[in-house]
Amino acid sequence: MAGEKLCGKCNENEAIEVCCECGVALCETCKYEISLDATHPAARIKGYSKPGALTPGTKTKIACKDCLSEIDVFD
């Protein structure tokens, strides 16, 4: 347990991720994953930015419960 980094929210479990907004270390139970479109919706309407065969089309952000409302959707 000497090399393990503890979760910044619960201080009980080993941290495996970092919050994308505040930078706090998060464990499996305290992290929240949000999948967003990789492009802005206006870009798809105009037709110049579409997900291709080599791009995933979505991106995943990891956040803590306190930062869920702070995530910028059109990042």
Image: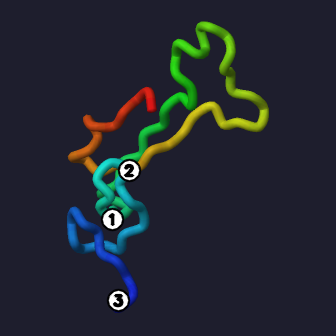
Residue 26's spot in the image, x, y percent? Answer: 33, 62
Look at label 1 and name its amino acid.
Answer: Ala
Within 10 Å of disc 3 (Cα), the crowding (few <14, some 14-19, many 20+) is few
> Is residue 56 rendered to the left or right of residue 5?
right
Q: Going from the N terminus, do you reach mark 1 or mark 3 first?
A: 3
Please say which color scheme the image uses: rainbow
* Residue occupying the point 58% across, 16% down: 43
Up/down of 21 relative to 12, above or below: above
Task: Specify the quadrant of the image occupied by residue 49.
Answer: top right
Q: Amino acid at mark 2?
A: Cys
Which label number is shown at residue 1? 3
Residue drawn at (45%, 32%) of the image: 75
How far apart in space, not on screen, are marks 1 and 3 (Cα)?
Answer: 16 Å
Q: Position of residue 67 (x, y in %)?
A: 26, 44
Q: Secondary structure at mark 2?
A: loop
Report the residue marked by disc 2: 20
- Contact between marks 1 and 3 (CB within 8 A): the answer is no
State the separation of the CA atoms marked 3 and 2: 25 Å
First in sequence: mark 3 vs mark 2: 3
Q: Amino acid at mark 3?
A: Met
Residue bearing mark 1:
25
- The residue sitting at 40% across, 29% down in the picture is 73
Callout 1 touching callout 2 (CB < 8 Å): no
Q: Nearer the viewer, mark 1 or mark 3?
A: 1
- Image-quadrant location for residue 58: top right
Q: Which mark is residue 69?
A: none
Residue 20 horizontal/vertical position (percent): 38, 50
